[in-house]
Image (spheres, grey):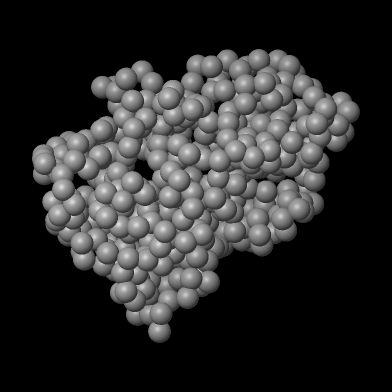
């Protein structure tokens, strides 16, 4: 019986899911967990037959979800590294270069067909990203494919990236290779360049991951998600249980010095500590403690909280704090909890600019999987994050919510900050302060992660 995409709490050991897991590329239902990752961006230069032949051969190296989960279990049992991870993703231009019509992706593929450079504009769904003419050179033109390679050994990864690049002679030109490296704090937790624990509050699909959250005491917030949140039928194969997922890739520069200076200025404006000021921006302290739970750190990266009834007017975690803008946790009455949960994305980002040999620029190679880019990533980014009037529609300056203080792109969208944690009024008694502009898009594209049966059939 075919797998139902409405299912969650998936047990990979159940034979029912074996074919699906063998057909699905890795890193979609669960992060691959490697410490180093190269992202190789390609523009096809060879004929269609040559490109198809290369993809068909490379499909033998692509890591399936089944292989990824088996490697994870082996690592936990023996400490043996999972080895090289590989994935391949095609843009709409890439499909067209193969002579394949992207109309078959249907309504969920509209944004994918348009590509990141052609995102539409509307009053309620703003596109505040800088124009593509200001992006880094490799992303300004056509990008046909992305090959992802990951390993725990940086030298092994570099050798593999060279080998893959050499194998593309006469098939594709390598536009750029973006190296990502996992950053960790003193506790071994993944962080980003501003120093905050990253990767929490992810939608979870697998039984063991959901059970682990519940063992950690998470019962107020349900982290589970149906497969259909990230998976869609692969339209170019008739194989049963052959699914793919839409991938958003964005290279985001982080101005660490500017961010830290602005946190210090915000702390002075509010007469609070710098750790609390930073937590009001992000929604969590650096150790992951949600600011809606307490005004100091120490609790750790808990995921067991909601904003109703604990913080309905944003006195603890402001409406413009990053994690509250991007995940309302049931506080968005206009959508309702179930519709709100359909907007979630599976984030798979990794920092760049970590190694000493890298340039001074630092940032995040943001990646997320979803089943509909418009309904999920674009809605979050444009209707919530970059909308100064969300979640409170107020057109008068100083009464609106303001942009997402962490990743909002509007340079003049001031936010309203509580004068005192947990005690300020809804509008009166707030401090006006413009925080933003420390994360900047440097380029990116939309891709589709095809099933392995499709890749092998080319």
Looking at this view, is 59 or 303 the one in front? 59
Answer above or below: position of 238 versus 306. Answer: below
Answer above or below: position of 1 versus 61. Answer: below
Residue ID at (32%, 65%): 236
Answer above or below: position of 150 versus 441. Answer: below
Answer above or below: position of 216 versus 325. Answer: below
Residue ID at (56%, 41%): 120
Q: Position of residue 136 (x, y in %)?
A: 37, 25
Rendering quarter of residue 251: top left
143 left or right of 405 in image: left
Looking at this view, is 313 or 130 the one in front? 130
42 left or right of 288 in image: left
Residue ID at (27%, 32%): 176
334 left or right of 408 in image: right
Q: Quadrant of the N terminus?
A: bottom left
Task: Note whether residue 300 is visible.
Answer: no
Task: Note whether residue 131 is visible.
Answer: yes
95 left or right of 210 in image: left
Q: Position of residue 19 (x, y in %)?
A: 31, 74
Q: Position of residue 82 (x, y in %)?
A: 24, 54
Q: Quadrant of the C terminus?
A: bottom left
Residue ID at (45%, 71%): 10
Looking at this view, is 86 or 130 the one in front? 130
Count up the numbered dots.
Answer: 0
Q: Position of residue 211 (x, y in %)?
A: 51, 65
């Amino acid at each position: 019986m075919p797998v139902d995409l409405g299912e969650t709490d998936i047990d990979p050991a159940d034979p029912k899911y074996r074919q699906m897991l063998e057909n699905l590329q890795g890193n979609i239902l669960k992060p691959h967990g490697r410490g180093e990752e190269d992202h190789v961006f390609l523009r096809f230069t060879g004929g269609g037959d040559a490109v198809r032949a290369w993809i068909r051969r490379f499909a033998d190296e692509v890591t399936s979800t089944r292989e990824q989960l088996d490697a994870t279990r082996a690592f936990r049992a023996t400490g043996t590294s999972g080895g090289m991870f590989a994935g391949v993703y095609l843009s709409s231009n890439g499909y067209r270069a193969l002579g394949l019509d992207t109309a078959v992706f249907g309504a969920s593929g509209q944004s994918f067909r348009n590509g990141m450079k052609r995102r539409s504009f509307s009053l309620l769904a703003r596109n505040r990203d800088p124009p593509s003419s200001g992006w880094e050179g490799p992303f300004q033109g056509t990008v046909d494919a992305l090959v992802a390679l990951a390993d725990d050994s940086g030298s092994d990864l570099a050798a593999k990236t060279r080998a893959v690049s050499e194998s593309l002679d006469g098939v594709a030109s390598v536009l750029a290779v973006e190296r990502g490296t996992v950053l960790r704090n003193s506790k071994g937790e993944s962080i980003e360049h501003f120093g905050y624990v990253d990767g929490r509050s992810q939608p979870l699909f697998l039984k063991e991951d959901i059970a682990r959250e519940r063992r950690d005491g998470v019962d107020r917030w349900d982290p589970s998600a149906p497969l259909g949140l990230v998976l869609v039928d692969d339209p170019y194969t008739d194989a049963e249980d052959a699914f793919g997922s839409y991938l958003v890739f964005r290279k985001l520069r982080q101005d660490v010095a500017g961010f830290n200076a602005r946190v210090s200025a915000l702390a002075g404006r509010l007469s609070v500590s710098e750790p609390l000021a930073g937590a009001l921006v992000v929604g969590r302290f650096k150790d992951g403690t949600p600011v809606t739970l307490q005004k100091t750190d120490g609790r750790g990266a808990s995921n067991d909280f909601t904003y109703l009834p604990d913080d309905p007017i944003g006195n603890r975690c402001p409406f413009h704090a990053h994690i509250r803008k991007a995940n309302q946790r049931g506080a968005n009455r206009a959508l309702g909890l179930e519709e709100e949960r359909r907007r979630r994305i599976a984030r798979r980002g990794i920092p760049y600019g970590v190694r000493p040999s890298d340039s001074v620029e630092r940032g995040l190679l943001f990646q997320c999987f979803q089943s509909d880019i418009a309904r999920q990533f674009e809605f979050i980014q444009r209707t919530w994050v970059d909308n100064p009037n969300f979640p409170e529609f107020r057109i008068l300056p100083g009464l609106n919510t303001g942009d997402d203080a962490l990743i909002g792109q509007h340079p003049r969208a001031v936010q309203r900050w509580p004068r005192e944690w947990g005690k300020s009024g809804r509008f009166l008694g707030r401090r006006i302060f413009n925080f933003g502009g420390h994360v900047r898009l440097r380029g990116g594209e939309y891709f589709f992660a095809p099933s392995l049966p499709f890749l092998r059939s080319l």
